[in-house]
Amino acid sequence: MKAVRRILLLLAAVGLMEAVPSYAVVDESQELRLRAAALTLGVGFVLIAAWLLGKLAAEVRLPKLTGYLVAGIVAGPSVLGFLSHETVTGMALVNGGATALIALTAGSEMDFRAMRPLFRSIGWISLVAVIGGTVLLFVTIFLLRPLLPFLAALPFGHALIVAAVLAVVAVAQSPAVVVALRAETGADGP
């Protein structure tokens, strides 16, 4: 019964988002206010849809994070288009805040006394994973340079630097997601 109610709530939110463009005022003097309203509406819709899809994902024994990702992809400009590219760009602050909250949650769940015997192993695994992951991503990004338009046009040295930065950023984001999945699935043990 709860699943049906969540699906109905999600459909109601989607219906409201579908109706929003019909109320848009095409007046240049209100363009800034309209952009701010679109950003606020977009953030609100994604939060509600992600929460509902996260609950539905948990009911079918998937991590809530799966529902969150599905909500963002489906609501984004590539699928349903409820959020324009401009609105998604404006949500960068929300994205940073969400990543910070995931990291805070991860830190609050660490039990250092239970981890003490594993510190040496954790250190080596982290070192190998971080450095190895960064090197692997760097090499992959650089080798795919001809297929990536933003890298293909850059001179060799600049492409090296951009590939290195992208690799470091990708590796830095992954621990927060891993810890969130660990907490979500209730995984325990060494």
Image (cartoon, rainbow, N blue to C red):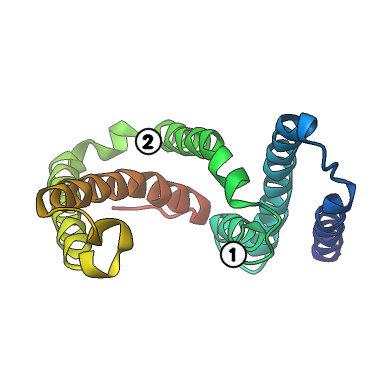
Give the residue drawn at x 58%, y 61%. Answer: 73
Answer with left or right where residue 93 lies relative to residue 28: left
Label located before the other in sequence (2 or 1): 1
**Residue carrying label 1:** 78
Left or right: residue 100 compared with residue 133: right
- Left-right relation of 27 to 179: right
Instruction: Please name the amino acid that badge 1 sits on.
Output: Ser
Instruction: Find out whether the residues at labels 2 and 1 contact each other: C-beta distance under 8 Å.
Output: no
**Residue 42 placement: quadrant:** top right
In the picture of the structure, the residue carrying the numbered disc 2 is: 110
Measuring from the top left, give residue 139's x and y in whole percent.
Answer: 14, 61
Depth check: give the residue in front, 79 or 171.
79
Secondary structure at numbered mark 1: loop
Quadrant location, the N terminus: bottom right
Residue 19, numbered circle? none
Distance CA(mark 2)–CA(mark 1): 37 Å
